[in-house]
Each structure stands twice: as structure tokens, then as C-alpha cells.
Amino acid sequence: MSFLNNISLADIKPLKVSANGRYLVDSSGVPVFLNADTAWKIAWKLNRDEVEKYLQTRKNQKFNTIGIVAFPMDIDNDRAITNVYGDKPFEYIKNKFNPLKPVTTSGENYKNSKEYDYWDHLEYIIDTAKSKNMYIVLLPAWGGRVAGAYGSGTPNSEIIFDKENAYKYALWISKKFKDKRNIIWMLGGDRSAIYGKHDYRKVFNSLAKGLISGSGNKEILISYHPQKWAPNSSEWFHNSPWLSFNSIQDQPSDQIKAITHDWNLKPAKPTWLLEGRYEGFKKGSITFKDFQVRFQAYQTVFAGGFGETYGNMAIWNFSKNWKKHIDDPGANQLRYLVKLMSLWSKEQYLSRIPDQSLLIGNTGKISGNSDMLSSCIAATRTKKGDLAMIYTAAGNNLLIKMRILNGPMMHAYWYNPRTGKYKISEKDVKKPTPFSNDIHSGKKALDYQFHVPKMQKESNDWVLILSNKKL
């Protein structure tokens, strides 16, 4: 009997944290695996036709979540910042935006510039995403608007929020969008909450309180987007009642450690990789490509992440050549992670745990210039051990403690994260086809070594699937 695809990857319903504090589920209790993309500047960089093209492409690629910023995040002179229709989000007062003076018009006819304002266009993006069954991770403000300079947190002209006006602005934007079922709120924005003597926690807390009040005190999801090479959201806000789940932004060598850290915190809260290294990242002679996208995603999900977030150097800021990179290989291949996670039943998914104790021997490491190489092995399974998945980034053979898994026999599959196909003998097949149906498991089972298919010299990553029922 095959598994049912019980994981909701499309239907838009309000999200909440699962009862065990580990994953996100919809209002019906169905798990939702977030496959997200960063499109931070879409609200002021793209017109309606371009928004439609971008979102439809990402939907076709099986993304179901898009991360965006409500208004311009740039340090540049606010007077010059408008969206593509020439609309400003706020009145320009005393050399900076005034967040208590949003520029709005009566009506929302996009063909009439006097009616279609900046916030109408943001609403169009949210509604268009919803029409495509996609969630929006919405930052009401980029972190620099609260915490100043990147890296140091030094107050500067970029800051427009304090404790008082942060609450009022958040109250306004939350009320405006309180009926949008596809919004997940995200505070932070590539900034820490504390930089030495500069403590911005009160302002971020005010933003959170305003969002909750504006929603009518409904149950809404809020997280915090931290800075790279700095503490993650759990450092400051894990015990804050408004923080629904944790988010990390780390380089590859820190990602598994950060996810594991958050997984082990009490009370249990979901966690994920909100921002890693982007496809197209260049440093000297190296370029992050599809392999780097895959190993960051699979390793963090198998380490306990409830989803993952993709990024592309040409997409997050919609550079002039963004359309050329919308179909980059890494973006297309993440659909196969979505496909893989849909193999878990609802009950299995909600009982999923990371478990490196399945593995015997060296579990690998991140290496190379800018962490571009991985030999890591990451394992995840259900609590009762009836389904397990092990990701091997460098194609290393796997020695598995079969006694940990539910007996008496396991069906074993090799899954190719580059193609979404299964390896059986010399063939690649689309439907789940085991290469073995008689791997002993259970308390008396011996350790078993699995030999990874040898397909290529580099980035020969595979997923081993072990199930006590045929998929």
C-alpha cells in the first residue's frame, strides 16, 4: 500500500504551529512544508505584469512561499525611492520617510495613477500570490529601519522607527491586511536585536505587539530574520510569546549547528533556514550553483527544519537580468525536495525527528572556499522508525544501525535530488521503486552498509529512503 500525499503544499489556509511545537500546519491540522524564495524588493521593483510572471514561474517550480519587504530597505535618499509606478509608501518629512504618514488614495484602479497607490500594489502582490496558493513572508520593515548600520547597529539616517511609532505603524499595516490568509509576518531584516550598547529589542517588541493588535488579537505567525555571522532569532526572542517559530541566517558551516541548537530549546518551537548562501554567489573563482542549493536545503530540513528558503543573487533585488536567472538549476531542483517530503503521511511527518544516531562512522563536514563543498550526512526518521531518510551530500556509502528502525523488514530506495527519480539497477524511474525489499530491521537487526550509486565525481548527492511499507 502506497503512502498518501497528506502534506498540504498548495491549499491556502491560515497557518499555525503544530501541537508538538515542531512544524507548521494549516487550520485543518495538515502539515505544510514551506518551499520559499527570497524576493525582498518585489514591491517596488516589479510592475503587475512582472509580478504575475515571477509568481507563476515560482508556482510552476513548486515554490509555495515568497519572502518580501513591505517598503524600500535601501539606505539611499528616501526622497528618490518609489515603486515602478512612481508611488511612495510614506510622506517625506524632515529628510526621511514618516511611517505614520502612509500615502494612500481612495480606490485601487491600477489604470488610474491617482487611485492606485503604493499599498494597493503591495496588496496586489499578496492577493496574486494567494490566487496561486502561495504564502507571503512579509517583513513590515527591513531591519536597518530599526537597527541602523549593517554589522554594527550604529544609529544612522536609515532608522525611522522608535518604540512608539513602531507600534502604531505595525497596528496600521496589520489592520490593513488582517483578512489576508496567506501572510506570515517576519521582523528583523538582516539585523541583530542587540549590538553592544545598542539594544533594539523594545522596538522589535513594539512591532510585534502592533501586528498582534492590528490582527484583532488573532493567532498569527511571527518570526525574526537575523543577521549572518551573528546570533539567530532564538538568542533574543525564543521565550517571547509573539515568536511563533525560529529563523536562522547562516553560512553553510553553521547551518546544521544552528538548526540543531534551536531544535533542542525549550519550549519547542519550529525552526528553519530563512536565508543561506544564494545561487549565483561569487567569490574569486568560486560560484554557488545547484549543488550548494541542494545541500543547504536537504541538510537543514533533515536536521529538523520545517521548510527551507532558496535565494538567487539576481532575484532577491530583481537586478536587470533577473528574468535570465528565474530558471536557474537550483531553483528548479528544489521541487524534488518538495516531492520527497510529500512521501510522509500526516502522522509520520508530525512525528519526524532528526536522528544522527542512525549513522555509524564519519558524518562529514563543510569545506572549501566560502563553504562551497559538503560531505555531510544527515538523517531523519519517524519516532517509531517506520520511515527514515538519509541524505549523503558527497555520495559516501552509508553504514546504518538498522536496529533503531521498526522491524522486521525495510524497503530501500535511492532517490536522486537532481532529478526526483529513483535509482534501480542501471535505470532511473519516476515512481518509487525499491532496490531492495528485504533489509532486516528491528531490535536484533545487524548494521547494514548501503553503497551509493556512482553517477558523477562531484556533487554525487543522494537520499536513502528506508520504509517498512512500500511507498
Image (cartoon, rainbow, N blue to C red):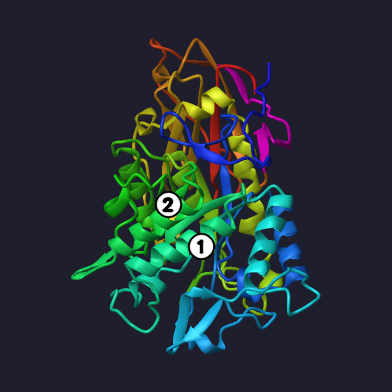
| Residue wearing tag 2 | 223
Q: Element under label 1? A: helix
Instruction: Work out whether residue 83 or residue 466 is closer to the camera in this orientation and state it.
Output: 83
260 lies above or below 61: above
Report x, y in % for residue 296.
48, 52
The residue at the point 44 percent across, 29 percent down is: 19
Report x, y in % for residue 375.
43, 49
Instruction: Work out whether residue 159 or residue 427 is closer to the camera in this orientation and state it.
Output: 159
Q: Is residue 423 on the magenta stretch? A: yes
Query: Relative to residue 36, is residue 241 drawn left or right?
Result: left
Please state the extent of the stretch shown in magenta in the rendering: 420-438
Report x, y in % for residue 443.
38, 11
What amino acid is at disc 1? Answer: Trp
Q: Among all residues in the image, which is located at the extreme right?
A: 111
62 lies above or below 382: below
User: In the picture, which quadrant includes the C terminus?
Assistant: top right
Earlier residue among tags 1 and 2: 1
The residue at the point 68 percent across, 29 percent down is: 432
12 lies above or below 55: above
Instruction: Work out whether residue 30 or residue 441 is closer to the camera in this orientation and state it.
Output: 30
Q: Element under label 2? A: strand
Report x, y in % for residue 350.
49, 28
Q: Can the viewer see residue 395 in this picture?
A: no
What amino acid is at disc 2? Answer: Ser
**Alpha carbon of mark 1 to alpha carbon of mark 2: how far?**
19 Å
381 lies above or below 329: above
Binning the other alpha carbons within 10 Å of mark 1 as few (below 14), some (14 to 19) or many (20 upward) gives many
Q: Can the viewer see residue 175 in this picture?
A: yes
The residue at the point 66 percent across, 83 percent down is: 86
| Residue wearing tag 1 | 172
